[in-house]
Amino acid sequence: MTRMIFAKGAFDMNVSKMWICGLVVVVLLVVSPSYAQTPLSTAFTYQGQLQDGGVPADEDYDFLFKLFEAEIGGAQVGGDVQIEDWPVPDGLFTVQLDFGEGVFTGDALWLEVGVRLGVSEDPHTVLSPRQPLTAAPYALYALSGPGSGGFWAANGDDIYNTNSGQVGIGTTSPLYPLHVVSDDSDAVHGESSVSGGVGVYGKASSFEGGGFGLRGDSYGTTGIGVFGIAAMTTGNNYGVYGQSQSQTGRGVYGLANSATGVNYGVYGVTNSPDGFAGYFDGTVQMTGFQLSTLPTDGYVLTSDAAGAGSWQPSGGGDSLWRTSGADIYFNDGNVGIGTSSPDLGILDVANVAGIDILSNGAGWIGTRGANGNLNAHLTNLTNYPNNGYVSVKNSLGTTRAGMYVAASGAGTIYADVKNFRVANPNQRGTDIWYACVEGPEAAAYIRGTAHLVAGRATVTFPDHFTAVATSQGMTVQITPHSAESKGLAVVERSIEGFVVRELFSGAGTYDFDYTVMAVRQGHEDYRVIRPDTEGLPAGEIEAGDADRIADTEAR
């Protein structure tokens, strides 16, 4: 028999008015396997008529053919077929196209044609629309009929089904890829006589969504969806065995889908007094559980010396914990973890870390050192429950460094020494520590080099300095670069800058260095001496004056 595929269509190009009408002829000869024949090529004949501006073309052309799964867009099927310098006399041409094996599987395909003059190196002009490939009657029969051209094909010693629909055995209306209906007791029987073999194997190979490797449904009132029997009376065998390799998988999953009645997702029964209806070797996690004997509110689950569990009343007949929906809570005294005498807050972990609520309603978190004294805590500024405070302490529990938000809203950091620290590029394994310059005011400075011309210079401050500094108490130091200098004086200064003159009416021209110190805006009333109760973290009693002075002297 033969298989023929036809295609035709008209196309317009932007470079010139051009259209093509094509006829695709594919001839496949199906032969009896009893005769030795040369395998037929996968090529097919394409006949077309090409017109340019309504006139039949009459030159050599380059053609580029492609197959696609859709008329517009879609994925390309097979490779490109390129034919160059092909004569088109009187607008007619015939070419052989071969897209390789496995291209024509019975699915709809569209042929895209690109054309350019044979002497041109420009890209091919793609003609639109694509041409659909349609099957001739004999080809349709070859796709649907029995035999080597029908539903079944061979691959070595194996055969496989090429049908895109369902396969039915014992039914003319299959609903599944393989649908078996039988009046016998077993519709499908699988048996393996090999040690370690599998009688029936199911696999859900999709990596997305839900799937069932093996599923059983029963519609009888006492039916069983899946029933497994371990028939041997010895050995560690399994009636039903489930295994999952996924990190979040389930070896065995049971679902009782009815919203009413007493049903069971997984139900286990043992007839042996020493047996287990359910046995778990590892951690068990559940959202709820219930014993056959209902407990009284406040009871706890406990076990006897043999490990048998039961509900028993807690100490005093009432549980210390309460429930609220899915939450549990405790509201009498402190809770200790790793300690039976929690004293570091409402939650005390081993007497070294605690969480508490202060009388002002603010939270408190603290940690203790190995000597039992506080070494750090997170709280609020005393008398200001909404201003945060981080306190770091010495071995005596005295705060030696802190960071907090003051009553004015200003962020404040204090310590014995303020440093910056960087790796030492000149000596591996060491760091460079620089300490901050300290004084009795909150100051800002700027320094630089300026140029004196004819004994006169004006230095203008940058905007960022004038934005943070004040002229109050401003000092300017200048150092000339010339040994011939008669001396320099600052004759004017303001928040905008300063003016320099050479002494004794000098007219020198040279560079000079300058350093300007000024009080920061908003800190004109910086207080050097303050009460020792100011700026303390809430929730603790700091050491008194004498203890603090003694601690400073000892260091």
Image: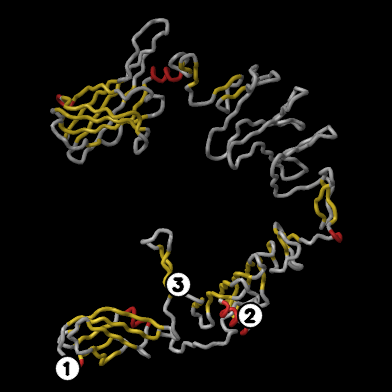
Reading the image, the residue beneath label 3 is 419
Which residue is pictured at 74% across the width and 38% down the height? 279
Q: Is residue 502 left or right of residue 156?
A: left
Instruction: State the separation of the CA atoms marked 2 and 3.
Output: 26 Å
Q: Which residue is mark 2?
A: 543
The residue furthest front is 554
N-terminal-most mark, 1 or 2: 1
Residue 516 placement (x, y as % from top left): 32, 84
Task: Please determine whether, in this image, residue 425 is positioned above or below residue 267.
Answer: below
Q: Which residue is mark 1?
A: 505
Q: Judging from the image, what secondary structure is the residue with disc 1 in?
A: helix
Q: Amino acid at mark 2?
A: Ala
Q: Position of residue 413 (x, y in %)?
A: 50, 76
Q: Image point 33% across, 23% down: which residue?
A: 100
Rendered position, 253 above or below 462:
above
Please tell me whether residue 249 is drawn above or below residue 20 in the rendered image. Answer: below
Distance Cα–Cα, label 3 vs label 1: 45 Å
Dot 1 crowding, Cα within 10 Å, few <14, some 14–19, many 20+: few
Q: As rendered, which of 255 and 423 lies closer to the eye?
A: 423
Q: Residues within 10 Å of mark 2 (few under 14, many from 20)?
A: some
Query: Looking at the image, is mark 2 or mark 3 earlier in the sequence?
Result: 3
Disc on the earlier residue, 3 or 1: 3
Report the amino acid beneath label 1.
Ser
Does 268 sit left or right of 149 as displayed? Answer: right
Q: How many marks?
A: 3
Relative depth, front residue between 301 and 540: 540
